[in-house]
Image (tube, rainbow, N blue to C red):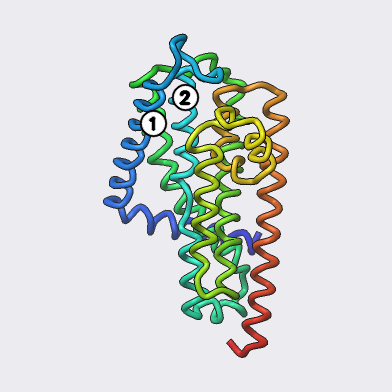
Amino acid sequence: MKGLHKYLLVTRTSIRSNLAYTADFIAGSFFFVLVIFIFMQLWQAISISDGSTEGYTVNRLVWYYITAEIVVLSKSSVFRSMNEEIRGGGVAYKLNKPYSFVMYQLSDGIGQIIVKLIINAPLGLLLGYLYVGGLEGFRWESLPAVILSVVLGILLNFFMDAFIGMTAFWTEDNSAFYWIAQKLSFIFGLLMPLEFLPGVIKNIAVLLPFSYIAYAPARLLTSFSVGTMLDILPVQLFYTALFAVLSQMLYLSGAKKLNINGG
């Protein structure tokens, strides 16, 4: 419990710190509204005559994008934070501290994520109801699974960013890795549901972790079934745990390299 308490303290401090920057979050809210509005207009314009595309009506598409955007825009700045710590040498002063560097970053990141969710989630719900009303065919019993999927999507995004950030131990500039990961996450789930992709590309996308960030929770909300839940949640959990372990392993390897080189 003592170990957990220090990380909770970091999270509380992060929440207070992020709440102080209200102007940044207001600006982020305007961006969130703009993105949702553009996607709503786009897919309403290209929907076929019967009002649906690949089984997605305008109503379902709007709620799909709102869910996907909530997940993506609620991410933390862990990649930038780790880059600054490692490149600036600040990580060297934390090697002997009585806490895990990765857990510290996670605790700080959770504070950022909570504040963003407090703003983005209600705003997204309001936009959806004002534009298309409630989600067609929504089932209240699906809500716990959807919430869990949103949490796993956000955590998967965090640990993937952390994993890429750790490569700063070995590379002069790892921004290209981050850029590629962001674009793959955008294409496989945020730009459009995977059902809109050609068959071969869709089959590949389902095997990659990128689609389990935004696509998975959005798909689960708009097309919930027990089968869909069993297809999505275990894979999300697997990839989240995998990148959490890989992040820790990469940090330990990088820290050892730092010590050997006299950092």
- From what the image shows, is residue 136 above or below residue 208? above
* Kind of residue at badge 2: Leu
37 relative position to 64: left or right: left
At label 2, counting other C-alpha atoms closer than 10 Å, the crowd grade (few under 14, some 14-19, many 20 or more) is: many
Name the image quarter holding the N terminus: bottom right
In the image, is 85 to the left or to the right of 40? right
Give the label on residue 95, or none.
none
Return the residue nearer the eye: 63 or 175: 175
Q: x%, y% of residue 125? A: 41, 28
Residue 174 locus on image (x, y percent): 52, 67
Residue furthest to the bottom in view is: 262
1 and 2 marks in contact (CB < 8 Å) = yes
Q: Residue at x 35, y 52 (%)?
A: 19
How far, Cα to Cα, is label 1 from label 2?
A: 9 Å
- Secondary structure at numbered mark 2: helix
In the depicted view, which residue is nearer to us: 99 or 77? 77
Where residue 17 sits, quadrant-wise, is bottom left
How packed mark 1 is, by other alpha carbons closer than 10 Å (few <14, some 14-19, many 20 or more), is some
Q: Which of the numbered marks, if any, corresponds to residue 61?
A: 2
In the depicted structure, whether residue 205 falls above or below residue 263? above
SS under mark 1: helix
Q: What residue is drawn where x is 66% and y is 45%?
A: 208
Q: Quadrant of the C terminus?
A: bottom right
Report the residue marked by disc 1. Answer: 39
Residue 217 x, y percent position in the rendering: 57, 34
Determine the residue positioned at 56% across, 40% down: 188
Q: Amino acid at mark 1?
A: Phe
Residue in view at x 37 percent, y 27 percent:
42
* Quarter residue 20 falls in: bottom left
**Residue 228 image position (x, y, % from top left):** 68, 26
On screen, residue 63 above or below 103: above
